[in-house]
Amino acid sequence: MIISVDTQIPFPRLLVFQTYRDKLQELLPYMENVHRIEPKSYRQENGRVFCTNEWHGGGEIPSLARAFMNEQMLSWTEHNIWNEADFSLEWRITTHAFTEAVLCSGKNYFLEQGAMTLVKNRGELVIQSHKIAGIPEFLKGQVAGFVEEVLSQKIGPNLIQMGEGVRQYLEKTAAC
């Protein structure tokens, strides 16, 4: 599955970039499908920030999915490299369930458009059904399809919601 979501935020690029990178905890109230974010590591090196965060999701889960999904299936670790020189973010996600079967990575670009910032989220999610452990062989394809379907219904809206949250946060803090 290709991830391609664009968001326009009516604030300067540097401010938007730094808000995404540095204000994650303050953005949490704007993300209804995320219960908490735990910072795991953070270091600066040669104009880049390397950080790792553990995300714990939730929100509306289809009733069929609730029968066999647990918190581990709604949690992931995000490994980020923020590069202020070109206003980009390289990211890789490690899921806490089906870790060996799920590949998810991409790059976000923060582009200046006058007084606006265009955030281009680009990535790919691949479910390798043959690597799903603990499930009978004949069900692996169905489970992989189901997991991809559930995730595809969450990823795009979550990225849009985060962009909207950044906009609301910046409007609120600019007014203070």
Image (spheres, helix red, strand yellow):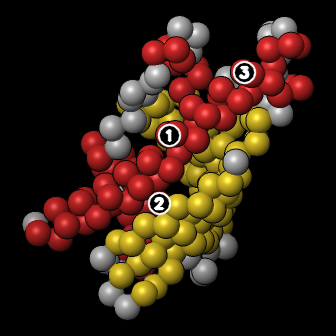
Q: Which residue is mark 1?
A: 154
Residue 47 falls left or right of residue 67: right
Work out whether 134 lies above or below 57.
Answer: above
Q: In the image, what residue type sits under mark 1?
A: Lys
Q: Is residue 150 visible?
A: yes
Sort mark 1 into few (<14), some (14-19) or many (20+) by Cα contacts within 10 Å. some
The tag on residue 13 is none
Give the alpha-carbon distance from disc 1 to disc 2, as whole Å.
21 Å
Secondary structure beneath dot 3 equals: helix
Q: In the image, what residue type sits under mark 2?
A: Arg
- Residue 109, quarter of the rendered image: bottom right
Image spot of residue 66 (x, y percent): 49, 14
Image spot of residue 44 (x, y percent): 59, 63
Image spot of residue 167 (x, y percent): 29, 64
Q: Earlier in the sequence, mark 3 or mark 1?
A: 3
Closer-to-camera residue (77/98):
98
- Residue 40, quarter of the rendered image: top right
Image spot of residue 57 (x, y percent): 46, 31
Residue found at x 29% / y 47%: 30
Q: Earlier in the sequence, mark 1 or mark 2?
A: 2
Seen from this angle, which residue lies furthest left? 176
Q: Earlier in the sequence, mark 3 or mark 2?
A: 2
Q: In the image, what residue type sits under mark 3?
A: Val
Work out whether 50 lies above or below 64.
Answer: below
Q: Which residue is mark 2?
A: 21
- Residue 61, quarter of the rendered image: top left
Sort mark 3 into few (<14), some (14-19) or many (20+) by Cα contacts within 10 Å. some
Q: Which residue is mark 3?
A: 143
Residue found at x 39% / y 27%: 60
Q: Which dot, 1 or 2, sits closer to the camera?
A: 1
Give the alpha-carbon distance from disc 3 to disc 2, as whole Å.
34 Å
Q: Is residue 53 visible?
A: no
